[in-house]
């Protein structure tokens, strides 16, 4: 507590301010009710924490996906236009144009469930029931070759689903692998023999003019 | 404010005279064309000899602009977007016109925007902030509650999108620093330390992570380690002295100094404390850095030191020979900028630029080099160093470690080719 506030508190609440317990909690806000926490706390973790009760089959998921998702993400999750691709991409991560999908890249199935429940369908978020989210997640897992056609995804069996790319993530290691970038005495004079232009933006110029974008499909 | 009030004085600021910088270029001054405006030698300038309308008639009244806007002659200084970048403009980005700004503070109306489900319009009287999870007592606050908390503070921080420069990994692509480096802004925030709120709820001993969540249709979530949350994160309602703009999270956002912009959740409605990270979409599908071997780095939160020459640049070419001001911005998520070097010969020789204005930690820092241009082609670059000794790498040095598919965290040195006519282009050099 700063000196000023102490003085002020003393002035206003003479007796109370002397008690150290008061200084600890400001006492603003109110306790959140269980119903309120339940309404907003819908997040799901890889260990299954946060999963709601429910279940849904690949088959149910397919029908729902065609109805609510395919207009942007394509009937097979291959995407319409530049909307995100949701299926495929396995084996592309080391290549020239990696395709990062929930199947090829995402480390955990819980992420797909959590994200669809919180943010999809785009423009009508939080309109799906929990059973519908289970079913659509099951369908996307099946399309990505992770579960079988007759799979029924549920709160109970959720953590048994293993994603193929889970082992390929590691924590930020820049401070060791990029140690060479710490250099307090950089070269200032005659640092290299020549500097030749090797690439121009102009060749593939896609810079928008006057606020108008260039359509590149 | 404490360490925020340090001024530039402590940083070495060599006196960089024009002559020292370009050396032999002194002769260039003789052939330099005069300023841009048409002016016939020897004839009086009618703008001076004739009475102008604005010198005769009354100007606007004080009632004309209850909320003032920049002059109409500055109408080109606006955020721009790249339409083909995303499928939907509600989940897209636009860019700060850094080529047309100066100093270190970004005006609120041109701070770049990134949202994932449009910028919602939220009545502050209907906004709530909840803290739940591993706390002694889950709490709900109104905006009024938050503004009554002791410990209110003002701090200046840069916010950079981790994808700033993301389109340039495979080569020079966009002609303009607004597009290559414009996913950044720097404003003064007013709010309270996140720690104050967490202490009020009482974080349990196993509370190791904090997850902010947005109230918008994307309900953005990220996992922040508790050490960072307690150290310098803020919950804020104002920027540059006025309420947050709608597109910057009105009425409430979280500030995560020095770390990638995606974590600075806007329209903040909930903070959950947990014992593990959540591995949500924005920290798995996005904001992980795919390397050449097919593996990916995650939790690459810190924005490394970076700098950009904003003038000249493709949208702000050189117009005249003779004296010119080379200007730019530098920043580091690891601390304070201690030095910026600039080159005009593509990195053969460098000189230290002059840091000007407040030099604050985790803030944009302005640099200048006063040059004398004789009309020769230049390959201009800048490189920043921070107080940890981190030196901004070249693009090739970065590519060697990271490949070209990591999208995020491209802090490589930018090159501008200035042609003899002053036209400036985004290039890559050997």
Image: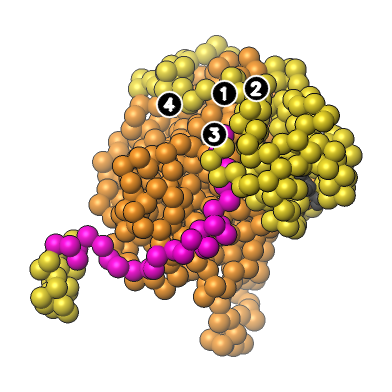
Query: x and y percent of residue B338 in the render?
Result: 35, 35
Q: Which residues are magenta?
A: A20-47
Task: Mark 4 vs mark 3: give the one in front.
Answer: 3
Residue B310 in view in this figure: no
Dividing the picture into quadrants, the one containing residue B417 is top right
At a point 14% along the width and 62% down the height, the residue shown is A20
Q: Nearer the viewer, mark 2 or mark 1?
A: 2
Rounded to the nearest angstrom, the CA distance separating label 2 from label 3 is 16 Å
Residue named by callout 3: A47
Left/right of residue A187 with respect to residue B405 in the rendered view: left
Q: What label does residue B209 carry, if any? A: none
Chain with colour yellow in the figure: A
Q: CA distance from mark 4 to mark 2?
A: 33 Å
| Other residues around mark 2 within 10 Å, as few (<14) / some (14–19) / many (≥20) | some
Q: Chain of mark 3?
A: A
Q: Residues within 10 Å of mark 4 (few under 14, many from 20)?
A: many
Distance from disc 1 to disc 3, alpha carbons, whole Å, reads 17 Å
Q: State which mark lies toward you, 2 or 3.
A: 3
Element type at marker 2?
A: loop
Near-viewer residue (B71 or B391): B391
Query: Are marks 1 and 4 in one subunit?
Result: no
Q: Quadrant of the C terminus of chain A?
A: top right
Percent of width and height locating residue B193: 35, 55
Q: Are marks 2 and 3 in contact (CB under 8 Å)?
A: no
What residue is disc 1 on?
A: A169
Q: Are marks 2 and 1 in contact (CB under 8 Å)?
A: yes
For the residues labelled 2 and 1, the Cα–Cα distance comes to: 8 Å
In this rendering, the label closer to the viewer, 1 or 4: 1
């Amino acid at each position: 507590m700063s000196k000023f506030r102490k003085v002020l508190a003393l002035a206003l609440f003479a007796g109370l301010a002397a008690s150290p317990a008061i200084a600890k909690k400001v006492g603003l806000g109110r306790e959140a009710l269980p119903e309120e926490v339940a309404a907003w706390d819908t997040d799901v973790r890889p260990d299954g924490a946060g999963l709601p009760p429910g279940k849904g089959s690949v088959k149910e998921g397919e029908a729902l996906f065609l109805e609510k998702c395919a207009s942007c993400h394509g009937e097979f999750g291959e995407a319409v236009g530049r909307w995100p691709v949701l299926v495929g991409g396995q084996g592309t991560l080391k290549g020239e144009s990696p395709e990062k999908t929930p199947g090829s890249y995402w480390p955990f199935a819980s992420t797909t469930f959590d994200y669809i429940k919180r943010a999809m369908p785009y423009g009508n978020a939080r309109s799906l029931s929990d059973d519908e989210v289970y079913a659509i997640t099951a369908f996307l897992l099946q399309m990505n070759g992770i579960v079988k056609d007759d799979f029924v995804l549920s709160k109970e069996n959720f953590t048994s689903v293993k994603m193929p790319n889970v082992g390929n993530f590691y924590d930020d290691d820049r401070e060791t692998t990029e140690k060479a970038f710490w250099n307090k005495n950089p070269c200032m004079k005659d640092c290299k023999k020549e500097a030749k232009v090797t690439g121009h933006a102009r060749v593939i110029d896609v810079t928008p003019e006057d606020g108008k974008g260039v359509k590149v499909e | 404010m404490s360490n925020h009030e340090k001024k530039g004085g402590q940083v070495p600021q060599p006196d960089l005279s024009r002559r020292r910088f370009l050396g032999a270029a002194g002769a260039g001054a003789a052939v330099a064309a005069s300023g841009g405006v048409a002016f016939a030698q020897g004839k009086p300038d009618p703008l001076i000899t004739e009475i102008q309308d604005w010198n005769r008639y009354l100007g606007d009244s004080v009632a004309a602009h209850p909320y003032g806007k920049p002059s109409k002659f500055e109408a080109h200084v606006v955020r721009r977007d790249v339409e083909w970048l995303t499928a939907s403009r509600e989940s897209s980005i636009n860019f700060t016109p850094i080529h047309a700004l100066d100093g270190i503070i970004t005006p609120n109306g041109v701070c770049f925007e990134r949202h994932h489900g449009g910028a919602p319009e939220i009545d502050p009287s209907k906004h709530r902030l909840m803290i739940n999870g591993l706390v002694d007592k889950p709490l709900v606050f109104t905006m009024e509650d938050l503004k009554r908390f002791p410990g209110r503070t003002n701090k200046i921080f840069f916010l950079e999108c981790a994808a700033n420069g993301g389109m340039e990994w495979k080569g020079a692509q966009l002609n303009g620093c607004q597009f290559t480096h414009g996913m950044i802004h720097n404003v003064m925030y007013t709010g309270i330390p996140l720690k104050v709120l967490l202490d009020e709820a009482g974080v349990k001993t196993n509370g190791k992570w904090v997850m902010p969540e947005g109230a918008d249709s994307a309900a953005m979530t990220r996992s922040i380690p508790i050490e960072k949350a307690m150290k310098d994160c803020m919950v804020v309602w104002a920027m540059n002295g006025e309420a947050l703009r709608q597109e910057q999270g009105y009425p409430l956002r979280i500030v995560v100094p020095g770390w990638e912009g995606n974590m600075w959740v806007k329209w903040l409605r909930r903070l959950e404390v947990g014992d593990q990270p959540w591995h949500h979409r924005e920290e798995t599908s996005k904001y992980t850095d795919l390397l050449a071997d097919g593996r990916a780095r995650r939790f690459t939160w810190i924005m490394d030191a970076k700098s950009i020459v904003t003038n000249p640049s493709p949208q702000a070419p050189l117009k005249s020979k003779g004296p010119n001001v080379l200007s730019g911005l530098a920043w580091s998520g690891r601390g304070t900028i201690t030095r910026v070097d600039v080159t005009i010969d593509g990195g053969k020789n460098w000189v230290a630029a002059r840091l000007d204005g407040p030099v604050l930690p985790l803030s944009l820092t302005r640099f200048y080099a006063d040059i004398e241009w004789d009309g020769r082609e230049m390959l201009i670059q800048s490189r920043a160093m921070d107080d940890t000794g981190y030196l901004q790498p070249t693009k090739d040095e970065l590519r060697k470690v990271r490949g070209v598919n990591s999208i995020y965290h491209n802090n490589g040195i930018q090159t501008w080719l200035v042609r003899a006519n002053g036209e400036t282009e985004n290039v890559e050099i050997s």
